[in-house]
């Protein structure tokens, strides 16, 4: 019974056609795609901060409940913390690469 569930090591894995388009990207294109992904993420974080400021103003006018403001504020805070951690990891990776000896 266990033998039926084990993978056959002799059979090669087949790649799907969706994976081949991604594998054809050059390092420059991959870097550009990653850069645009990070730029979009930063724009979303900025948009979340603007939304929080707008909701704070609406709260002062009595148009929004405090729970809505708190939820938006926490979302914005978590996004900002994530961006900070991604930046820290990128800097650590860069520093590690610079420490490697050739």
Image (cartoon, rainbow, N blue to C red):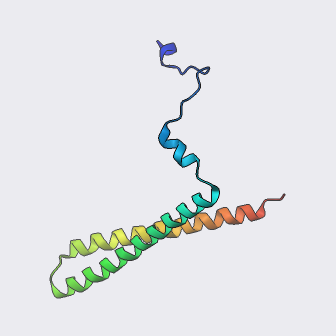
Q: Is residue 93 left or right of residue 43?
A: right
Front residue of this view, candidates 25 and 99: 25
**Residue at position x 56%, y 64% in the image:** 32
Vertical relation: 2 (above or below) 33: above
Can you name the residue that lies furthest to the top here?
Answer: 1
Quarter holding residue 73: bottom left
Vertical relation: 10 (above or below) 13: above
Front residue of this view, candidates 28 and 53: 28
Q: Position of residue 28 (x, y in %)?
A: 63, 61
Q: Is residue 32 left or right of residue 48?
A: right
Q: Position of residue 4 (x, y in %)?
A: 48, 14
**Residue at position x 56%, y 19% in the image:** 8
Front residue of this view, candidates 66 and 82: 82
Quarter holding residue 13: top right
**Residue at position x 60%, y 21% in the image:** 9
Vertical relation: 46 (above or below) 98: below
Vertical relation: 50 (above or below) 19: below
Q: Position of residue 74 (x, y in %)?
A: 34, 70
């Amino acid at each position: 019974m266990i033998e039926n569930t084990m993978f056959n090591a002799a059979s090669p894995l087949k790649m799907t056609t969706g994976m081949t388009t991604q594998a054809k990207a050059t390092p420059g294109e991959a870097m550009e795609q990653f850069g645009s992904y990070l730029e979009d993420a930063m724009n979303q974080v900025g948009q979340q901060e603007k939304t929080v400021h707008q909701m704070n103003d609406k709260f002062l006018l009595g148009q929004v409940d405090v729970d809505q403001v708190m939820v938006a504020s926490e979302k914005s805070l978590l996004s900002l913390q994530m961006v900070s951690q991604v930046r820290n990891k990128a800097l650590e990776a860069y520093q590690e690469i610079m420490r490697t000896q050739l």
